[in-house]
Amino acid sequence: MKVLSGRYGYYQLLQKNANIRTQLVETHLFSQASLTMCLEKSNNLLIRPLVGPSCMQVRRFGSDEYEVERKGEKIQCSDLPTLYQVIHENLIDKKQYVVQSFPLEEPIHQRSFYTLHRKTQFANWHVLHKTTSRQGNEIKRYDLFRQWNLMNVLLEIGETLGEAFPRCSTVVVEIINSETDFLCIDTVVHYRNSKWSQFHSLGNKWFSRSFIPKTDLCTKWTVEQFLHKMNDVILKPCIGQQGKGIVKIHVTTSRTYEVQYRNKKTIFQTFEELYRHLERTYLTKNDYLIQQFIHLRTVDQCPYDIRVITQLDRGKWLVTGMLIKVAAPEYFVTNRAQKLLTIDTLHDFSLDRSKKAIEKLCLKASKILEERTAPLGMIGFDVGMDANGKLWILEANYTPALSMFYGLGNNEMYENIHHFIRLKKSNEIE
């Protein structure tokens, strides 16, 4: 039987488990009838797409007064037909939505995101990470039974979704806490192309852990905490390529916030203004990570990183290509490269000396990722070196662009990469 993906599909799967069912927020496909039904049970609703982070909140005041909040903007409605019309007008065309009702009448103390991860398809799930969405009052008397019950429910969610989606290795579960109960209001399944799943695959091995920038899920609370500890951070979509949607935030000496997307910069005077801009422009479109920004070594004041191609040949990983990508002027990412160089032509002594260390790092990381996300045949790593000569794995791509190797020198690396691609195909045919 085909399993539906997305929020409603996950809800239907999880509802079949009696231990999970009681801790789920009631969820229905959005329609005028389901909206009316949910408002009969609760004064607080959420409208979400089947897939994606966008969210609309609906509140009822009194018998027939409503408020719709989306991206920080509030719209008042005086009756149910008007409410439905306002919601419908704000939905994105050609997308299905769900409506969720909250039975909790007492105050919500905190919303938390728990990350579940398993090493392989057949390994056990573990709760590896907790991210809060905002600063809140921690529950002082969080009894042991409730903690045990929460962990059990989280692990059963992982087991249920992992069985239905065997290629999934990471699940994020959003939990709301009150004084007496907790409820699961959302689940997001991350596959191997998710940077959050990749972070946990590499970050849980002692060898690669120190080469990964500090990373967390992007929420208002984590953005505030990161910016409190460091002056430069970067926001990345969990799923994306070619630098699309990547944003840099810099805390200036006057404690204002400079947001850079590509080569354009905007200044915000307060954190609230900053986060409102991030939410409206980026965070409602994709699930995002927040990450420590690495100040890379430069060529003519332009940062560069190293693209490394590794390929699997008869059970052994090989480095088959390596080049330098130099960012365009005023850009902080190298996806918009002004030029491509070989290590030999860059004439950077520190980089020359680190070439073998880069190869060793990428080969070790390839083995780790193969163990957790098999089958793999090729990985494109972006490796950065900071001013102190420390190496960082900035990203790993399972379908790397190879055209950048064409026309580089005598095309030797390009031909080498394609030699192993053809070899892999011939081995598969045999």
Image (cartoon, rainbow, N blue to C red):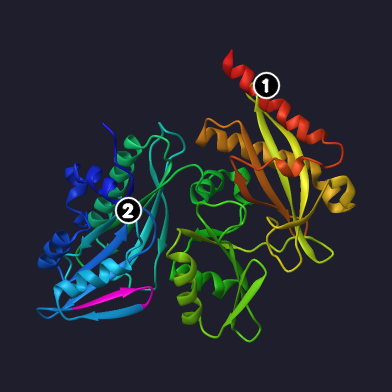
Q: Identify the residue shown where x is 81% and y is 41%.
A: 407
Viewer-proximal residue among 418 and 293: 418
- The CA distance from mark 2 to mark 1 is 41 Å
Q: Is residue 330 above or below residue 34?
A: below
Viewer-proximal residue among 212 and 324: 324
Can residue 107 be spotted in the picture? no
Q: Position of residue 255 (x, y in %)?
A: 60, 84
> Magenta residues, as a range?
66-72
Q: Quadrant of the C terminus?
A: top right
Q: Position of residue 75 (x, y in %)?
A: 28, 80
Taking the image as shown, residue 411 lies to the left or right of residue 263, namely right
| Residue 67 counted in the magenta span | yes
User: For the residue marked with disc 1, what is the amino acid?
Assistant: Leu
Q: Identify the residue shown where x is 36% and y is 62%.
A: 92
Residue labelled with disc 2: 50
Taking the image as shown, residue 164 lies to the left or right of residue 268, namely left
Q: Residues within 10 Å of mark 1 (few under 14, many from 20)?
A: few
Q: Residue 423: give its label.
A: 1
Q: Position of residue 66 (x, y in %)?
A: 19, 77
The image quadrant that residue 93 belongs to is bottom left
Q: Quadrant of the N terminus?
A: top left
Looking at marks 2 and 1 on the same chain, the residue that comes earlier in the sequence is marked by 2
